[in-house]
Amino acid sequence: MESIVVTGIRNRWIIWCFLVISTVAGAAEKKVNSVEITKLTVPHSIENGTKDFALLDCEYSLKDNRTLLLEVTWFHNDHNIIYKWIPGHSKRQFLGILEGRVDEGYTVSNVPWQKYRGLKILKPTTEFSGKYTCDISTEEGHATEGSSLIVYTKPKKYEVELKVSPEHVNVSCWANGVYPEAKLSLSYKNVDQIKMTEVVEESSLISGAYDVQIHGFVDRKSLVSPTMFNCDIKIPNTSYLVRKDVMFTGRRIREDGSEEDIAHRLESGIAIILITIITHFIINH
């Protein structure tokens, strides 16, 4: 009999614990769902120095429009608070990279608790690259969402060239003053079964911008004339993609080490033959 009573108490205890946990979980879910970010607007990429401003927005909805203890906070790169607005308080906080770089009168809505949720960044430069996170919180819950912006700089100089030796053709490509770090790639066309070897990529950060370069070697004997070599430069996560070409035209190496174009040599040879024939004709007539 005692065993039955103990078992009954234990079962009621388990049921009570289950009900408590379910109630707490339901309340937590309700709290979280009381705030929702419906649309986050962050430009994907901007070329440095080309825009007067960049607009960021964080549209949100509140259950039953409950605005008690509403706070709008923007973060840069996850942990750096750059903006905080509490509706009903006259002073908004612009921190870090936003100090002196925003339009403080910018509004996105006439609704009092939505009015200053967005940001208007003036003349965005490369230091504004990074992840932007919007956090909306009230007494009943909060929501957060983030997206990345890239402010990129095109290279100040970008070249591709060939250096020809008796054994190899060295294909070199470089770009200076680009941000963020760009990716260079070499390719070629109008050729069959040519293998580029010893491909080396190098990169260095100088005064907030990158110098990048790539080199590759091709066996001189495997080339045919003409052969077009390409160098592509791509800034990741942007639409910036540019190609430059250089043509291998079948140059030979003179004994003194200087280069000579095959076509030029052929033209010179034909001219010498013609002069010899004309001279012989005049002497004999």
Image (spheres, grey):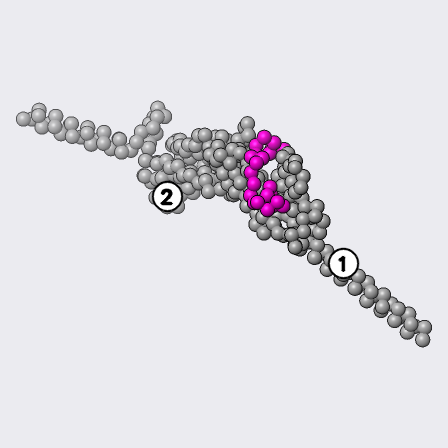
Question: Which residue appears farthest toward the left when viewing the image?
Answer: 285
Count neighbours of disc 1 (C-alpha within 10 A) and say few if under 14, some if 14 to 19, many if 20 or more.
few
In the image: residue 159, left or right of residue 88: left
In the image: residue 173, left or right of residue 38: left
In the image: residue 132, left or right of residue 1: left
Task: Report x, y in % for residue 142.
Answer: 68, 49
Q: Which residues are magenta?
A: 96-117
User: Which residue is painted at 76% across and 62% down in the image?
Assistant: 22
Residue 80 visible in this rendered orientation of the protein: no
Does 207 appear in magenta? no
In the image: residue 170, left or right of residue 109: left
From the viewer's side, name the closer residue of 36 and 129.
36
Q: Which residue, given by chain and number where applicable, does mark 1 sit on?
A: 24
Find residue 110 and report its image quarter: top right
User: Which residue is painted at 42% across and 32% down in the image?
Assistant: 159
C-alpha gap between disc 1 and disc 2: 66 Å
Residue 120 visible in this rendered orientation of the protein: yes
Find residue 229 and report its image quarter: top left
Numbered badge on residue 189 = 2
From the viewer's side, name the closer residue of 13 and 247.
13
Q: Amino acid at mark 2?
A: Lys
Does 113 appear in magenta? yes
User: Which residue is painted at 8% across and 24% down in the image?
Assistant: 283
From the viewer's side, name the closer residue of 109 and 136.
109
Helix, strand or loop at mark 1: helix
Find residue 255 and report its image quarter: top left
